[in-house]
Amino acid sequence: SKHVWLDQTSLKRLAAEYSQSFKSKGDDDTGWGEEIHFVGKEELTVQYLLALDAINFCFWPSEGQWEYADVSGALKQAVQSDEEVLSAVRLSKITEQELRALLGGKDMPNMQDRARLLREVGTGLLTNYGGSAAKMVRSCDRSAANLVRAMITAFPGFQDVAQ
């Protein structure tokens, strides 16, 4: 970006503060929260995380509205009920109505866009990685930069850019 930069000193200070905050609450440094996230077999966990990331946009916490924990928890429940619910084949064909059902029958903003992005994820996984998000991650040789490149190539919806 031409107009954004990170103050490395402040970033390190903030990271240390957050780490200390987690430790003082008895949490680990990850802040993961298995109560709202699916954790299971590697293949399924990575598929869950990719689907969650694809629909995790454009909503803000407010009374009675969707929050991140609601979305992640609804997807977690869906995966626990049906391990194939986030398969690339099913994602590549998901409709707005199917997404609503996946989220426990509740509406959330931009359902049409969220369903489109999940179809894009399913199609991208089928086309490039044999349907496996874990295969995509493994192909990146433990490099975050490679993973970002792989994701924005396979899933154009992840190209978070402003004009």
Image (tube, helix red, strand yellow):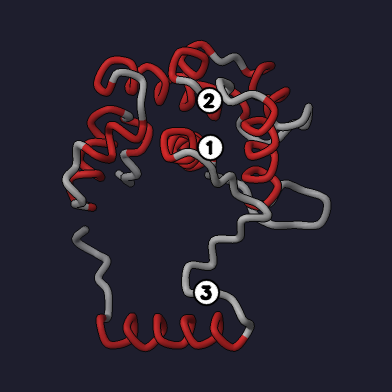
In the picture as drawn, the residue positioned furthest to the right comes out as 64
Which secondary structure lies at badge 3? loop
Q: Position of residue 45 (x, y in %)?
A: 48, 40
Q: Is residue 125 above or below residue 44?
A: above
Residue 28: numbered disc: 3
Quarter of the figure that contains the C terminus = top left
Q: Which residue is mark 2?
A: 86
Q: N-terminal of the two: label 2 or label 3? A: 3
What crowding class fits label 1: few (fewer than 14 Cα within 10 Å), some (14-19), or many (20 or more)?
some
Q: Position of residue 117 (x, y in %)?
A: 46, 27
Residue 5 placement: quadrant: bottom left
Q: Position of residue 116 (x, y in %)?
A: 49, 21
Q: Is residue 118 above or below residue 42?
A: above
The residue drawn where x is 28% and y is 15% is 127
Which is nearer the eye, 109 or 69? 69
Q: Position of residue 102 (x, y in %)?
A: 68, 26
Do the residues bearing badges 1 and 2 touch, measured as CB atoms within 8 Å? Answer: no
Q: N-terminal of the two: label 1 or label 2? A: 1
Q: Is residue 147 above or below residue 132?
A: below
Q: Which residue is mark 1?
A: 55
Residue 60 placement: quadrant: bottom right
Quarter of the figure that contains the N terminus = bottom left
What crowding class fits label 3: few (fewer than 14 Cα within 10 Å), some (14-19), or many (20 or more)?
some
